[in-house]
Image (tube, rainbow, N blue to C red):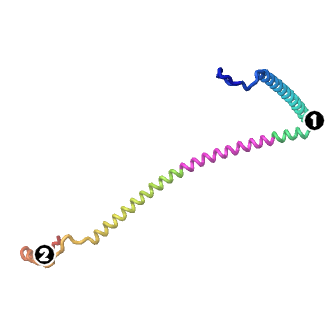
């Protein structure tokens, strides 16, 4: 098997393996062709059965008045269903449009509400400031305390000098 002079590997596969593989490939090809032919025959058989069934249904419709009535009722029912669906779609479209309009109106009203609240807050502040100003005017102390004794003496001196009586409060 292994010789010291040659550094090759020993052969584990017999030399006639190519012949075995060719026979296996040929058997596989024959099986594939057999399966293919059977499948084609089955498809043809099924197609002919379907065609027969379709012909029987077609002839049965001509002979059976109930089948024809069912067809008419089915067609009418489908027309009514399509009409109803069309009307439903119109209602949905109108509702969507109204929904968009209502949303726009709500946005507008919300902005107006914010503006009004802001204006009311400014008016409240102005009223508070006005009230504080009025309270400040009523309770405002004199600029200087008035000394009535001094005024009396000043006025009497002036009265004697001019003959008139004036009372100054400044």
Q: Is residue 60 magenta?
A: no
Q: Residue 43 location in percent, x, y?
A: 84, 29
Q: Which span of residues is magenta-colored?
A: 76-104
Residue 108 located left or right of residue 72: left
* Residue 45 place in picture, x, y as percent: 88, 29
Along the viewing direction, whichever of 129 and 63 lies nearer the viewer? 63
- Asked if the stretch drawn in magenta spans residue 80, the answer is yes
Residue 63 tag number = 1
Say whether disc 2 or disc 1 marks the residue closer to the N-terminus: 1
> Which residue is painted at 28% across and 72% down in the image?
139
Quarter occupied by the C terminus? bottom left
* Label 2: how many Cα within 10 Å (few below 14, some 14–19, many 20+): some
Q: Give 15 or 70, whichever is nearer the viewer.
A: 15
Circle 1 residues within 10 Å: few <14, some 14–19, many ≥20: few
Which mark's residue is nearer the viewer, 2 or 1? 1
Of helix, strand and loop, which mostly describes the magenta segment? Answer: helix
Q: Circle 2 is placed at which residue position? A: 165
Residue 154 in the figure: left or right of residue 118? left
Q: In the orientation shown, which residue stands out farthest toward the left?
A: 161
- Going 39% across and 59% down the picture, which residue do you hit? 122
Q: Is residue 103 above or below residue 13?
A: below
Which of the 4 image quadrants contains residue 56? Answer: top right
Q: Is residue 70 left or right of residue 97?
A: right
Q: Residue furthest right?
A: 63
């Amino acid at each position: 098997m292994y010789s010291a002079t040659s550094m090759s590997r020993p052969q584990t596969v017999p030399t006639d393996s190519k012949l075995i593989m060719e026979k296996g490939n040929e058997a596989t090809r024959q099986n594939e062709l057999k399966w293919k032919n059977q499948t084609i025959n089955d498809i043809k058989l099924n197609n002919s059965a379907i065609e027969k069934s379709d012909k029987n249904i077609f002839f049965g419709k001509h002979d059976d008045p109930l089948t024809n009535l069912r067809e008419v009722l089915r067609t009418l029912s489908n027309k009514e269903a399509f009409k109803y669906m069309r009307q439903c779609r119109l209602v949905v479209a109108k509702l969507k449009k109204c929904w968009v309009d209502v949303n726009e109106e709500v946005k507008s009203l919300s902005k107006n509400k914010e503006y009004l609240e802001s204006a009311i807050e400014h008016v409240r502040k102005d009223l508070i400031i006005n009230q504080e100003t009025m309270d400040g005017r009523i309770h405002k102390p004199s600029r200087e305390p008035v000394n009535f004794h001094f005024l009396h003496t000043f006025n009497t001196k002036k009265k004697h000098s001019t003959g008139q009586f004036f009372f100054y409060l400044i």
